[in-house]
Amino acid sequence: MYKTHAYAARSATTPLSPFEFERRELTAHDVRIDILFCGVCHSDLHTARSEWAGTVYPNVPGHEIVGRVVEVGSEVSKFKVGQLAGVGCMVDSCRTCPSCQEGLEQYCEGPGGFVGTYNAPDKHTGGVTYGGYSTQIVVDEAFTLHIPENLELAAVAPLLCAGITTYSPLRHWNIQPGQKVGIVGLGGLGHMGVKIAAALGAHVVLFTTSQSKVEDAKRLGAHDVVISKDADQMAKHANSFDYILNTVAASHDLDAFVTLLKRDGAMTLVGVPEHPHPSPSIGNLIFKRRSLAGSLIGGIEETQEMLDFCGKHGITSDIEMIRMDEINTAYDRMLKSDVKYRFVIDMSSIKQ
Ligand code: NAP
Ligand code: ZN
Ligand code: ZN
């Protein structure tokens, strides 16, 4: 067993604080990773504060993990000690259901679905899984990713969730060069969506509620920026979008965006707000055969494809590095949409 330092939420209403636990002994297929950086996803906050039902305390969040392999099990073939490695939102799945067989482990149909990196039943320990706000992790190599060597490591961490969650729908809805693509919300997911959609050759329009983010959005690759609270600006784009990816973390009026889609256009929701959205207008959907859809992270094979794509295109996240003990302030700032554009924890700060 490996003594591990971490930060955990003890309840929905108390700040995260230092916590110690033990990582399991390695099985033949496991790697042990010394965690160097971990991104801070809005899902961490939703979970730590029990905004979605079912948080088991203590809860160690974190599913944007990068680090270095320090030990490998006897049958590990993908990794060697000393290599960089990443772990995203999943650490296991049933591996035999139709979705797993297709490399779509995030939609695992086995009992309980995929095993989340945190707050999921841990079949090795009998407890719950603990995530990346910790000094090390033991993971099956099948759920461990290779990190492109040419990118800044800390800025790669957010690709493991924010990157794949935006890459996967953009690929699934087959975004092509020249298509008009909207990204709603310039947070962690949204800023990755802008960069990836631009790299795919789309004409990217960013929708934001924050006037202060307009210049940044253009720097990040948006061709146009719309203040979504401004009805006149919104009206100019009616019936014009091939596709919209909505990353907003709070409930809001979906019709304002659905009406911007062309006939046969689609809007995919990836934000999972604490409170439901007001029901969208069905007329807006049927009269133009528009679709409203959802999408969940991405499979392991596609996550590797996304990392390689980002390596090739030089894409990383724009990050603000924090110490582990700054996590509670970071959460409060995230709730005010005051993040440019992803907090990343420097895990060496936990040992100090
Ligand atoms: P984030 O960094 O906090 O960004 C969310 C952005 O939404 C904000 O920066 C803000 O952008 C906009 N926003 C916030 N409140 C709003 C409001 N009331 N009305 C309109 N816009 C608002 O969060 P994130 O880490 O990107 O995560 C976004 C959501 O996706 C979360 O709910 C998270 O749990 C979920 N998520 C889902 C998946 C999945 O697989 N589907 C994966 C990861 C995360 P502006 O300032 O530009 O308006
Ligand atoms: Zn996430
Ligand atoms: Zn499965």
Image: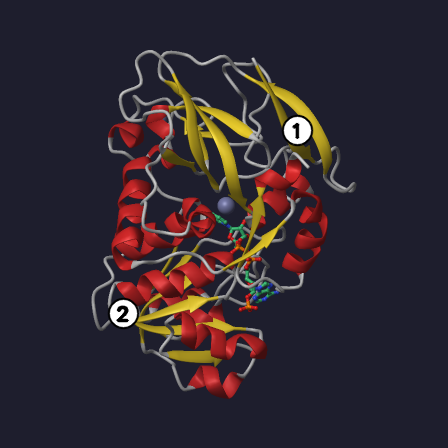
Residue behind mark 2:
202
The image quarter containing residue 13 is top right
- Residue 163 drawn at (x, y percent): 40, 51
Locate the N terminus and report the quarter of the image it occupies: top right
Residue behind mark 1:
56
- In this orientation, which residue lies closer to the viewer: 207 or 133? 133
Q: Residue at x 54, y 48 (%)?
A: 41
Q: Is residue 6 above or below residue 261?
A: above
In the image, the residue with mark 2 has its CB under 8 Å from the nearest atom of ligand 1: no
Q: Name the amino acid, label 2.
A: Ala
Q: Name the amino acid, label 1.
A: Val
Q: Relative to residue 154, is residue 16 drawn left or right?
A: right
- Name which of mark 2 and mark 1 comes first in the sequence: 1
Q: Can residue 265 be seen by looking at this rendering?
A: no
The image quarter containing residue 62 is top right
- Residue 345 drawn at (x, y percent): 58, 46
Q: In this view, does 122 lie above or below 11?
A: above
- Residue 225 drawn at (x, y percent): 44, 79
Q: Which residue is drawn at 38% across and 81% down?
A: 238
